[in-house]
Image (cartoon, coloured by chain):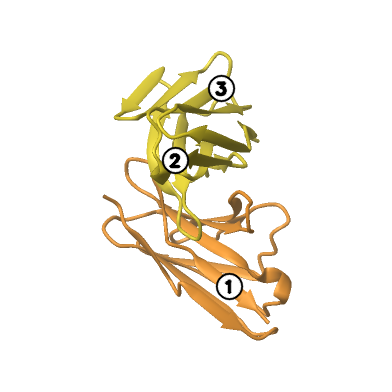
Chain colours: A orange, B yellow
C-alpha cells in the first residue's frame, strides 16, 4: 500500500527557533500533499494544501509567513514553523494523495516549544 | 465550503456488539467518503471508503452506507473487539485534484471486554 513518512517524529525546541518537518511519499508520486494540525482529543484541522511546483494554499486563519510550505518534488513537501512559540506546540500530520485519490497520512510530528 | 458533522462523540459497546457512527455532510458535490481509525499518538489509518456511485460497501466486519439524497453516511462495525477501541473520523471531499478532505470531529469508541 501507499506509504507516507514524516520526519522528525518528535521535536522539542526553544521559543523563537524554527523547525522544519519533512513529509515524503515513499512508493508513489503525490502532486498534492496536505498539512494538518491536531490538538489533544480534537480532530484534524487542515492548515494548507501543498501543490508540487506552485505556492501552497492556506486555510483561513493560518499565517503563511509563519508556516512555510515547500513542495519541491513529487515525493517531498516540507513545513517550516518559523519563530515557534509555545502555542504552536501540537501534533502536525501530513497526508499525500495517491493516483487513486485516496489520502494516506504520515506518522505525525509532535512539536513541543518550550 | 463543506461541513461534516459526526455523532456520537463517544461510544461504548460491549465486546461482540455492533457499533454505528453517523456523519452528515453539506456539499452535495462531495463524492468521496473515507473513514479513518486513529489510535492514541498514531497516524489516522484509512479503514474503508465509499464513493458516491454506490450505496454500501463491506469489508469483513466493517461496512459503510451512503445516502446521497439525505447527505449522510454511516460506519458499521460488527462483532466488536477490544482492539477496535480508537477514535474514528469520517471525512468528505470532492474526489479530484487538490481538494482536501474535510473531517468530522471524531468518535471515541470504547469496546468493553
Q: Which percent across, then down, holds residue B9?
A: 63, 38
Identify the mark nearer the N-term, 2 or 3.
Answer: 3
- Report which residue position mark 3 lands on: B72
The answer to whether B107 is drawn above or below residue A30 in the figure is above
Mark 2 Cα-neighbour bin, 10 Å: few <14, some 14–19, many ≥20:
few
Disc 3 from disc 1: Cα separation: 35 Å
Q: Position of residue B75 (x, y in %)?
A: 47, 29
Q: Given the image, what chain letter belongs to the residue carrying mark 3? A: B
Are discs 2 and 1 both within one chain? no
Mark 2 lies on a secondary structure that is loop
Q: Percent from the top left, x then y, of residue B49?
A: 40, 33
Which residue is labeled 1 in the image?
A111
| Depth order, front residue of A15/B60 | B60
Q: Where the C terminus of chain B falls, by quadrant?
A: top left
Q: Which residue is mark 2?
A: B113
Residue B19: tell me if it is visible: yes
Give the number of marks. 3
Which residue lies at the image location 32% right of the left edge and 44% below the top edge? A99
Amino acid at each position: 500500500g501507499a506509504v507516507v513518512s514524516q520526519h522528525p517524529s518528535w521535536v522539542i525546541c526553544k521559543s523563537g527557533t524554527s523547525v522544519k518537518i519533512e513529509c515524503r511519499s515513499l512508493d508513489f508520486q503525490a502532486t498534492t500533499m496536505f498539512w494538518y494540525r491536531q490538538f489533544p482529543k480534537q480532530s484534524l484541522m487542515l492548515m494548507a494544501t501543498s501543490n508540487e511546483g506552485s505556492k501552497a494554499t492556506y486555510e483561513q486563519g493560518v499565517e503563511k509567513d509563519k508556516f512555510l510550505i515547500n513542495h519541491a518534488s513529487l515525493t517531498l513537501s516540507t513545513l517550516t514553523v518559523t519563530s515557534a512559540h509555545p502555542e504552536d506546540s501540537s501534533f502536525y500530520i501530513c497526508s499525500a494523495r495517491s493516483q487513486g485519490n485516496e489520502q494516506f497520512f504520515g506518522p505525525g510530528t509532535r512539536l513541543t516549544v518550550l | 465550503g463543506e461541513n461534516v458533522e459526526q455523532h456520537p462523540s463517544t461510544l461504548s459497546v460491549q465486546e461482540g456488539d455492533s457499533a454505528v457512527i453517523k456523519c452528515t455532510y453539506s456539499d452535495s458535490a462531495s463524492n468521496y467518503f473515507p473513514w479513518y481509525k486513529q489510535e492514541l499518538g498514531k497516524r489516522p489509518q484509512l479503514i474503508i471508503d465509499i464513493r458516491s456511485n454506490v450505496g454500501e460497501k463491506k469489508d469483513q466486519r466493517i461496512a459503510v452506507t451512503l445516502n446521497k439524497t439525505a447527505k449522510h453516511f454511516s460506519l458499521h462495525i460488527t462483532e466488536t473487539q477490544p482492539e477496535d477501541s480508537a477514535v474514528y473520523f469520517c471525512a468528505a471531499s470532492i474526489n479530484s485534484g487538490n481538494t482536501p478532505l474535510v473531517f468530522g470531529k471524531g468518535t471515541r469508541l470504547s469496546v468493553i471486554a
